[in-house]
Image (cartoon, rainbow, N blue to C red):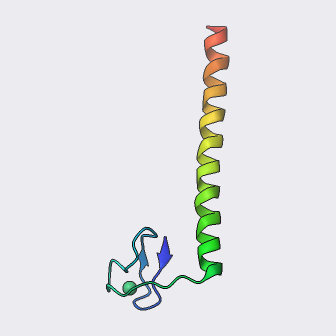
Amino acid sequence: MFRCAHCSKVTDLQWRNCAHCGKVIDYTVAEKFDMLAESVEAALKKELQNRKKNKIMQLFSKRG
Ligand SMILES: [Zn+2]
């Protein structure tokens, strides 16, 4: 998610234009890096949760 500099509403990262005011969003290199880092972090956290869940499921299936 990204906060539009024109209307200061939060809009989706995938869109080149703001969904609210339609202005073209110019990301700086630092902003792009932050967004990339956040999306990678979110993906890694999700993967970690899945792995933990699978591990717990395996423990239960072994005992049962
Ligand atoms: Zn906007």
Horizontal and vertical percent for residue 20?
32, 81
**Total of numbered circles in the picture?**
0
In the figure, is residue 20 to the left or right of 47? left
Q: Assign ligand 1 to one image quadrant.
A: bottom left
22 up-or-down from 38: above or below: below
Q: Nearer the viewer, residue 49 or 12?
A: 12
Horizontal and vertical percent for residue 10?
44, 77
28 up-or-down from 1: above or below: below
Q: Residue furthest top?
A: 64
Q: Residue furthest bottom?
A: 6
- Identify which residue is drawn at 64% across, 57% down: 41
In the figure, is residue 6 to the left or right of 56? left
- Identify which residue is drawn at 60% across, 78% down: 31
- Identify which residue is drawn at 63% across, 49% down: 45
Q: Quadrant of residue 15?
A: bottom left
Horizontal and vertical percent for residue 44?
64, 49
User: If the image is split into quadrants, where does the C terminus sit?
Assistant: top right
44 up-or-down from 5: above or below: above
34 up-or-down from 51: above or below: below
Horizontal and vertical percent for residue 49?
62, 40
Q: Nearer the viewer, residue 47 or 32?
A: 32
